Amino acid sequence: MSISATKKAAVIVGNRTHASDTGSPEVQVAILSERISALQEHFKANPKDHHGRRGLLFMVGRRNRLLTYLARTDRDRYQNLIKRLGLRK
C-alpha cells in the first residue's frame, strides 16, 4: 500500500531539516513509518496476504537500517526522531 501524494508531502514538510530536504534519514524514516502503518491496517482486513507481508518486512528492515545509521552518526537527531515518531522506547 502506498500513501497519497498529499500525505507524503505533509510527512516530508513535518520532518525535513531544510527547505529542499527530501532525502535525509529523518524524512526517509518518517515516510517508511507512514507506509508501514498503512500496511498494518491493510493486514487487519487481509490476513492471508503473505506477499504483501514480505514487502512489509523489507520496509521494516530498511527503516531499522536507517535508524541504526542515524544513531551511529548523530545521536541527537536520532533521539529527536524516535521521540517525534513514537518509535521504540
Image (cartoon, rainbow, N blue to C red):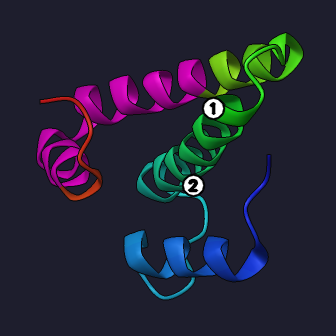
Residue 23: x and y in percent read 60, 59
Q: Which mark is residue 31?
A: 2
Tell which of 61 and 76 is nearer to you.
Answer: 61
Q: What's the magenta region? A: 60-83
Residue 40: x and y in percent read 59, 35
Relative to 61, does residue 31 appear above or below in the rendering? below
Main structural element of the magenta stretch: helix, strand or loop?
helix
Q: Residue at x 69, y 83 (%)?
A: 6
Classed neighbour count for the residue bearing mark 2: other residues with Cα under 10 Å, few (<14), some (14–19), many (≥20)? many
Mark with earlier residue (1, 2): 2
Q: To which quarter of the image does residue 45 belong?
A: top right
Q: Name the residue furthest right.
A: 51
Q: Name the residue furthest bottom.
A: 19
Residue 24: x and y in percent read 50, 56
Q: Locate residue 11 relative to residue 59 in the image: left or right.
A: left
Q: Residue at x 73, y 19 (%)?
A: 47
Q: Which mark is residue 29?
A: none
* Residue 70 can be seen, yes or no: yes
Q: Residue at x 14, y 38 (%)?
A: 75
Residue 27 part of the magenta-drawn span: no
Residue 4: x and y in percent read 76, 71
Element type at marker 1? helix
Q: Amino acid at mark 1?
A: Lys
Q: Residue at x 38, y 28 (%)?
A: 69
Relative to 65, does residue 73 appear above or below in the rendering? below
Relative to 69, does residue 87 appear above or below in the rendering? below
Relative to 44, does residue 24 appear above or below in the rendering? below
Q: Amino acid at mark 2?
A: Ile
Q: To which quarter of the image does residue 48 belong?
A: top right
**Residue identifier under label 1:** 44
